[in-house]
Image (tube, rainbow, N blue to C red):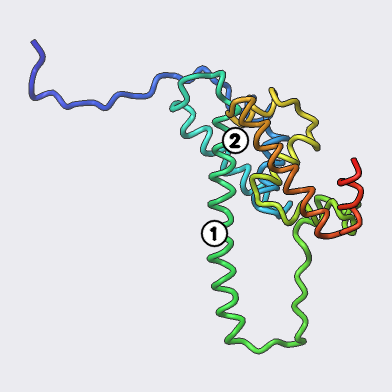
Amino acid sequence: MPNDDSPVRPREPAANPIDWPAELQRHGRWLRTVALARVGDAAAVDDVMQEVSIAALQKGHQLRDPSRVAGWLYRLAVVAALQYRRRQGRRRKLLDRYADRQPSIDGTAATPDPLSWLLADERKSLVRQALETLNARDAEIMLLKYSEDWSYQELAEHLGLSVSAVEARLHRARQKMRQALCRLDPSLKKKTVNR
């Protein structure tokens, strides 16, 4: 019969059979694309990926199904990117408040476009401009589809979605992309109507 005076010990998480460093290495490239689409700054991707790695190592025991590693890492990357953007927004507000109190020395405060590293060769192209008008989810799925050259099945596995959900998201993202291109260059509207 157990003694009622014995201290209650919390259950320790079972040993996790997932090799997180290997999984992070395997999924790192496309996760970096997701982070870039979400934060818009190539220099910030390393910070976001570090947060993803820490979260995976600390919370990896919560994942019960090892076949869902890609979807779980995707969600970690999205959350880490959102948290990064939140921190940067607060930091920017603080700097703006400080800058308002301090007089400008030379009056030039040109900030470079943070996405210029991603698409440096296409800086002046219509595709680049249209991509910037898309929301983060649409830009993300377009970048993963066309920069990683993944099939619908691969996208579904990595994003933790069904194939039909991926098809629907890509269809909507493409429609928005076409509309953005036509807004930027009305002559394209004639070409898409004639098809």
Label at residue 74: 2
**What residue did someone put label 1 on?**
87
Q: Residue furthest top?
A: 1
Q: Name the amino acid type tagged 2.
A: Tyr
- Seen in the image, is 57 located left or right of residue 102? left
* Residue at horizontal 70 percent and vertical 87 percent from the top: 104
Of residue 167 and residue 161, the one placed in the foreground of this image is 167
Asked if residue 14 is positioned above or below residue 116 in the image, the reply reads above
Q: Earlier in the sequence, mark 2 or mark 1?
A: 2
Circle 2 SS class: helix
Q: Identify the image quadrant of residue 138.
A: top right
Of residue 193 and residue 85, the one placed in the foreground of this image is 193
Q: Position of residue 29 (x, y in %)?
A: 73, 35
Q: Position of residue 3 (x, y in %)?
A: 8, 18
* Residue at horizontal 61 percent and vertical 47 percent from the top: 48
Q: Name the amino acid type tagged 1.
A: Arg
Residue neighbourhood size for the residue with mark 1, other residues' Cα within 10 Å, grouped as few (<14), some (14–19), many (≥20): few
Instruction: State how far apart marks 2 and 1 are (Cα).
Output: 20 Å
- Seen in the image, is 75 located left or right of residue 141? left
